[in-house]
Image (cartoon, rainbow, N blue to C red):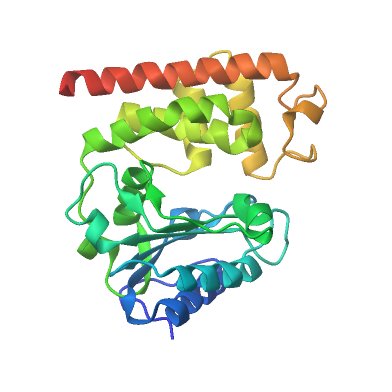
Amino acid sequence: MVRGTPENPTLPDHRALQQARAAVEAAQRHLGPALLAAWLYGSAADGGLRTHSDIDLLLLIEGGLPAPAGTALTANLLYLSGIPGDPQRRPLELTIVDLAQIRPWRYPAIREYQFGEWLRAELLQGATIERQRDPDLALLLTAARQHSHALWGPSAAQLLDPVPERDRLRAMREMLPELAENWEEDPRNAVLTLCRMLVTAVTGDIVPKDQAATWVLRHFPGPHARIVGWARAEYLGENNVGENNVGERAHSGAAIGPIGPARIAVQGLADLVQARLDEAVEPRT
């Protein structure tokens, strides 16, 4: 039975909370006493679920993740997670970290497991989720410490060490080149992630995707404004332009337009993020 800390308030999205609890219950069955805590974080934890929001879960274990447990958990998550556009279930993103790998904190951290809908096709063909180095954990763990709901065990602030600002900046610098190069695979999320990086580089804050886009449009207007506005509107469900494939979008106010100008705009935004990260890091080196 899922049990969280008593001080957690009731979450506004009851269906999302039920789905999250079902995922944690599956993890409890397969991980047993190795599961130390499970936290709901991100937009589902702060009541800011949008049309295309995932349900983000972070699980803390002790003693590593046995391969059979990971395989069994993946089978359950493929059933519990909703594919994009499913009106009944949201996509799940579930990350597992081992206490020994993150406490005391060191960069880069190792994650034991991460399930997400972007892996569905590969997983259905027999792929497995592997343990790997993950710079993004510097940001993920920070987000969980700042605002999360315990669905099992103590709060994230009790069990997770703070991540130094320099490591959060290092993580973004390391992830930026791949994000900028492969943005066409998932343009909406790539653009919004660039916006979040820019906010964090300038202010130190980690904010929801739509808020990050609004902040960028207000503080850094420029050639990237159209694509940022498109990504924000699509994330909020305000666009009705079909699949998330920029190559097939019509040139309209709702779409981001031809792929060439869109690519230039995204590269310009990525260059802006890089410059701000460099400015933030240099005084510390």
The answer to whether residue 218 is above or below residue 235 is above
Q: Quadrant of residue 147?
A: bottom left
Residue 216 visible in the picture: yes
Horizontal and vertical percent for residue 58? Answer: 40, 61
Quarter occupied by the C terminus = top left
Query: Left of 126 or right of it: where is 255?
Result: right
Task: Tell me the residue at 56%/31% (across/down).
Answer: 191
Horizontal and vertical percent for residue 64? Answer: 33, 66
Task: Tell me the residue at 46%/78% (across/down).
Answer: 30
The answer to whether residue 209 is above or below residue 145 is above
Quarter occupied by the N terminus = bottom left
Query: Left of 252 or right of it: where is 63?
Result: left
Task: Tell me the residue at 32%/81% (across/down).
Answer: 33
Query: Left of 19 or right of it: where is 60?
Result: left
Please tell me how many numbered marks the rendered image carries. Answer: 0
Task: Tell me the residue at 72%/20% (across/down).
Answer: 259
Horizontal and vertical percent for residue 67? Answer: 45, 68
Q: Quadrant of residue 13?
A: bottom right
Query: Left of 88 or right of it: where is 225?
Result: left
The answer to whether residue 242 is above or below residue 123 is above
Horizontal and vertical percent for residue 91? Answer: 61, 58
Residue 249 visible in the picture: no
Q: Quadrant of residue 164?
A: top left
Q: Which residue occupies the extreme bottom position in the image?
A: 1
Seen from the viewer's position, the closer of residues 121 and 11 is 121
